[in-house]
Image (cartoon, grey):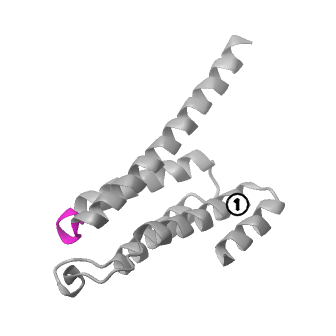
Amino acid sequence: MILLALTLFFLYYRSLLNLQICSILLLFGFIIILFKNEKKTDNQYDKTKLSDIEIILIIVLLIIVAFIITNDVDFDIFITLILIELIILEEFIKKFINPSLQIRLNILIYIMLILYVILIVKKIINLSIIYLD
């Protein structure tokens, strides 16, 4: 609820920085909802597997790093960097997470990939309009 209130506050004053902050807050909320596992399983006590909280913290740290790196550039570069980070993260931690978290991470990657495709198509349409005029 707090994340939603902060998102609406930052959306009121529109700028590139506020748009990135809003997307980060919404992404944080979505990641917490997606990866939070309420049921206790035996894999929770397995020290070779990462827990859902550890996955959330890793992804949040990656998003913060992407935000710091792409602070002054376009929003599509920010989304691209997050997508690249998630794909690399998925490859590195594939052996250390249980199958249900692997499926959730793949869902997050697919959603970010769809968002990336939408941004690229929008950019292509804008460029084609500019060159056709």
Instruction: Specify whether residue 27 is painted magenta.
Output: no
30 over 127 or under it: above or below: below
Image location (x, y in percent) of residue 129: 69, 19
Residue marked by disc 1: 17
What kind of residue is marked 1?
Leu
Residue 78 at what x, y percent from top left? 55, 53
x, y (%) of residue 130?
A: 70, 20
Q: Quadrant of residue 96?
A: bottom left
Task: Tell me the residue at 17%/66% (across/down).
Answer: 95
Q: Which residues are magenta?
A: 93-98
Q: Residue, x 23% and y 63% (percent of image)? A: 92
User: In the image shown, does 126 or 6 lie closer to the viewer?
Assistant: 6
Q: Can you say whether 17 is above or below 126 in the image?
A: below
**Dot 1 alpha-carbon crowd within 10 angstroms: few under 14, some 14 to 19, many 20 or more:** some
Q: Is residue 16 above or below residue 8?
A: above
Q: Residue at x 60, y 64 (%)?
A: 26
Would residue 96 be found to the left or right of residue 67 on screen? left
Q: How many marks?
A: 1
Depth order, front residue of 36/60? 36
Query: The N terminus is located in which quarter?
Result: bottom right
> Does residue 67 appear left or right of residue 10 in this picture?
left
* 104 to 4, vertically: above or below: above
Q: Is residue 95 magenta?
A: yes
Element class at badge 1: helix
Q: Give the position of the C terminus as an image quadrant.
A: top right
